[in-house]
Image: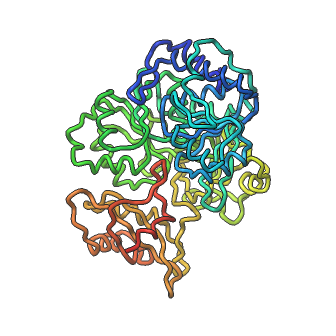
Amino acid sequence: MLTSLGQVLPAAAAKYGDKTALIADSKTFSFRELDQLSNALAISLTKLGVAPGDRVTLYATNSWEWLVSYYGVLKTAAVINPINVMLTPAEVGYVTRDCGAKVLIGSRDKVAAVLAASAGCATNIVFGADAPPGALPFAELVSRNASFDAVPVASEQLSTIGYTSGTTGHPKGAMQSHRAVILNGAMTAQLHAKTSADTVVTALPCPHVYGNVVFNGAMMFGLTLVLHPRFDSAEMLASIQTHRATMFEGVPTMYMYMLAHPDFDRYDMSSLTRCTVGGQTMPVAKMQEVERRFGCPLIELWGMTELAGLGTTFPCYGPYTLGSIGIALPYCQVRIASVTDANVTMPAGEVGELMIKGPIVMLGYYGNDAATAQTIEPDGWLHTGDLASMDEAGQVFVVDRKKDMINTAGFKVFPAEIERVVAMHASVAMVAVGSQPDEFKGEIAKAYVVLKPGAAGDEEAILELCRKELAAYKVPRAVQFVADLPKTSTGKIMRRELKTLDA
């Protein structure tokens, strides 16, 4: 039984040896090779003064060096701080200062920009053989071949500080224990029946908890991980075909881009046995299209940084319901609480705030007791900020984020509900709904639509569909056709940025 993340690669190397563990950057690595490379980095970090409990920030796109750095840091019993590659140097400076990072590791371009802004750490390491002034070359630190015993760490101790997106101000650092991250990766792998016979293709960013669950699960259960530095629909389709992938894991927009690719039908998807989708709600009509055209089940999941990954999903070997985020992860509980009183549990079918409790819940926000107290109840229940309902079977259905709700003349309108209907129109590739101020109603809904290749925009046809399927107050008051939608590094649509598209 693994008790720390530093044990993941040694255990995998002992069990799977020379089996291919990772394909990235046109290079292939066995489990044994990844273990040896991370050993070399752990030795170098120790010589540079990294001690148990020190924080190390990791700032780069997906790569083999990213994974080696992640496990190398954790072998020293230091705390890993994986950050979003889209952060600016100023934001990186805030994060490293907030968590007290001693070392910054990352790609040359990212670290160089941080150093130029005088926001680096005491020790800075850049991937590759050459380093700018003020940094050390990663290649030299992994060049030696030596053994290293992972420093023992109790499973309840801090392993990771993962910063939230900071949509309401400065980001907060969610503290995750070794046990939380290991359990999340292991239980997700169990529910999705991941084994050493699987090959998974993904472009999910490794710093994101969804990406973290994917790569940790792959390393723990002997999968071959085909890791892409960024999402490109043609590259994903080709990768699935070339590597005979059994799984693809991504967010809704990734699937929508792939479905809309003009050459989709030329690619062979027959090796896929199941796919997963999470990070944001996905219209059922699009999920059905994925299952039909990919030729395999699409298993939805839900999670957040404060949970070290997933909180709910479906087991892939049992019944599942499209449009539901599933049931609670093993060892966890979920319930729907009243939005006005967290102690009151809503009846089946009623909408309230989704709350979760169990060993995957964060230890708290780093250095922020007030925010921790607002998010975690004294009895351990975590506020998720998501509005949802639960049926009699325990299946959870997310309605929307509380913060994204639109208040139209006193009526509560959820963007995801409108998006579900608009996505049903045959011409629609992607849709996002945002709010606009209105003199009489306070707020009104507006749909931003990306059309499928070759499709013509017909605003009235889309509005007519909405009038047929939705109550009058939910129907968007405008439809704007756009070339693309604003997204985060993980591919989530940023509803708060939709106003920048206004014609």
Q: Is residue 399 visible?
A: yes
Query: Taking 487 as reference, is 351 left or right?
Result: right
Q: Kindly identify the residue that appears in the image at 71 percent across and 26 percent down.
A: 48
Q: Residue furthest front?
A: 133
* Figure quadrant of the C terminus: bottom left
Query: Taking 121 as reference, is 395 left or right?
Result: left
Q: Kindly identify the residue that appears in the image at 60 percent across and 33 percent down.
A: 125
Q: Kindly identify the residue that appears in the image at 24 percent across and 37 percent down.
A: 267
Q: Residue furthest bottom?
A: 440
Q: Kindly identify the residue that appears in the image at 48 percent across and 63 percent down.
A: 495
Question: Does 422 appear above or below 365?
Answer: below
Residue 208 location, x and y as percent? 55, 43
Question: Does 391 appear above or below 33?
Answer: below
Looking at the image, which is closer to me, 470 or 181? 181
* Figure quadrant of the N terminus: top right
Residue 288 location, x and y as percent? 33, 49
Q: Is residue 190 visible?
A: no
Looking at the image, which is closer to me, 435 or 45? 45
Residue 424 location, x and y as percent? 32, 60
Query: Taking 440 as reference, is 265 left or right?
Result: left
Quarter-wise, where is residue 474 in the image? bottom left
Quarter-wise, where is residue 242 in the image? top left
Question: Does 209 appear above or below 423?
Answer: above
Residue 265 location, x and y as percent? 21, 42
Query: Taking 276 as reference, is 359 left or right?
Result: right
Looking at the image, which is closer to me, 253 or 329? 253
